[in-house]
Image (cartoon, grey):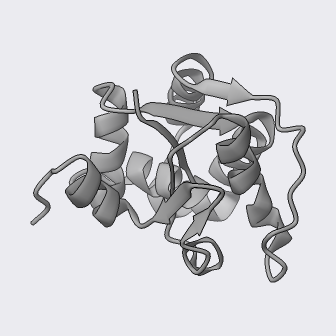
Amino acid sequence: MLRVVIDTNLIISGTAKSNTIPSYLLEAWRKKEFLLITSIPILSEIKEVFNRNKIQTHFSFNSNDIKDVIQLLTTQTVITPGTLSVDIIKDDPDDNKFIAAAIEGTASYLISGDRHLLDIGEYEGIKIVKARNFLEDVLHQKIA
């Protein structure tokens, strides 16, 4: 099965709004069209971002919404230990955790909207692509 890492902002926005490209991406994961790879550092970041006042206010998340997503992410994904350290992205070193998780989890794709990651394009055979490109080109879904 295809192994994929998704960055935090896509998980947050895909949870927040339905009928969006990030929500279609999460729906494809829930339908088991690919195996989601994450790591302890990524899960920590997702929890932290979900709990930001600005995010909760903007998207109207409540504690049950957050709990449900975290529960899915901790039970329906492959969680890597996050012990691998890479130093690929100099401008935003925090993004390196996504590349590290992709390497540790032997992912084929890293899906992101972050230009620091997208500018790399590919690293050690891991393709770094936008969500729309992944959905259309890899999963062959038509996006309006």
- Residue 75: image quadrant is top right
Q: Looking at the image, which residue is at 78% across and 61% down?
A: 96
Q: How many marks do you count on the picture?
A: 0
In x, y percent, where is residue 28?
29, 37
Asked if residue 55 lies left or right of residue 144, the reply is right
Q: Which is nearer the eye, 144 or 55?
A: 144
Q: Can you say which quadrant of the picture contains the C terminus?
A: bottom left
> Which residue is at the far front?
125
In x, y percent, where is residue 10?
48, 57
Q: Which is nearer the eye, 127 or 132?
A: 127
In x, y percent, where is residue 64?
53, 28
Asked if residue 100 lies left or right of residue 108, the reply is right
- Residue 110: image quadrant is bottom right
Q: Can you say which quadrant of the picture contains the N terminus?
A: top left
- Residue 7: image quadrant is bottom right
Decide: is 105 above or below 142: above
Q: Looking at the image, which residue is at 54% across and 74% down?
A: 118
Decide: is 122 above or below 51: below
Q: Looking at the image, which residue is at 40% across and 51% down?
A: 14
In x, y percent, where is residue 106?
62, 37
> Which residue is at the far top?
75
Q: Looking at the image, which residue is at 68% across and 58% down?
A: 53
Decide: is 132 above or below 63: below
Asked if residue 40 lies left or right of residue 132, the reply is right
